[in-house]
Amino acid sequence: MLKTVPDLPPIRETIARHGLSASKALGQNFLLDEQLLDRIAALPGDLSGANVLEIGPGPGGLTRAALRAGAQVTAIEMDSRCLPALAELSEAFPGQLTVIEGDAMKLDHAEIMRGEPFHVLSNLPYNVGTALFVKWLSGDEWPRQWLSLTLMFQREVAERIVSKPGTGAYGRLAVLTQWRSEAKLAMKVHRSAFTPPPKVMSAVVHVTPAKAPEGVSARVLERIAEAAFGQRRKMLRQSLKGVQGALDALDEVGIDPTRRAETVSISEFTELARTLRSLG
């Protein structure tokens, strides 16, 4: 059950009182609809007592929702203007909120979360959202410390994450996500829900770890996907020729080198990475 918070003003009032405005340079767009925020915070499941990492909380709209759900929230915010509003939330939810001022791209999230499992719940700043997402997915260590990723993206990016082979949205992000995770587009969010309204629609993606295929190096798979989709209109024999051993691996696996990357399934990419690793 959601906790009631006495005397907590609406987010719009908090923004006005602290003179906050969304920074385009920081990729900020504030969500004010608290019912919508509660629905987003419910996507990971029961957060009571759970550790949550939030990137770019801004004035704390989604932060409130996670705190109401009973989570222990660690929020990383690089915009010092937002810190007083977040400090008020710390007072309203004693012992539940830790705010760290800094750049999430430069910080060690595992260290910040003290080595404990955590959920990531964020309305990600548009200018670093994809880079952070890839950071959470990358690396050979699996499963990672995070238990789930519940993230707001531009809808176009969200659709790329959950896309299937043979579609125009299918690419590197789909491969990096789906080869050892389950990903779903959990909620579409209209641009009018934000202040200021962005030029594009948004969507929330929910990702949970799955079993990683054996014998596959994440770094090798990432390199293959980057090369293949870096020249997606070209045949594989052209796009992968810069990856040492990749053409031999294509032959070994039985993938026609005249195919294009968007036709190659995720299982074929993982088999290609496994074979390339063994050939190396």
Image: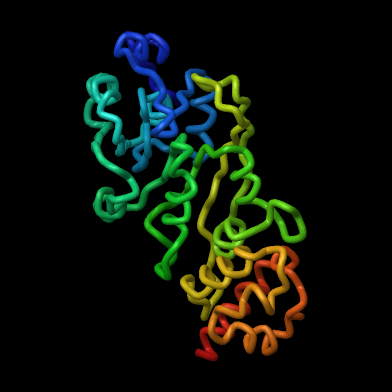
Residue 274 in percent (x, y) is at 56, 81
- 88 with respect to 33 (left or right): left
Residue 247 in percent (x, y) is at 64, 85
Q: In which image quadrant can residue 156 be found?
A: top right
Q: How is the image coloured?
A: rainbow
Residue in the foreground of this view, choosing between 41 and 29: 29
Residue in the foreground of this view, choosing between 128 and 214: 128
Residue 69 in view here? no
Residue 168 in view here? yes
Up/down of 109 relative to 126, above or below: below
At 44% from the left and 36% from the top, the residue drawn is 125
At 37% from the left and 48% from the top, the residue drawn is 118
Residue 58 in percent (x, y) is at 36, 27
- 198 with respect to 3 (left or right): right
At 36% from the left and 10% from the top, the residue drawn is 16
Up/down of 90 relative to 14, above or below: below
Residue 24 in percent (x, y) is at 43, 29
Quarter of the image for the N terminus: give it: top left
At 42% from the left and 12% from the top, the residue drawn is 12
Up/down of 278 relative to 153, above or below: below
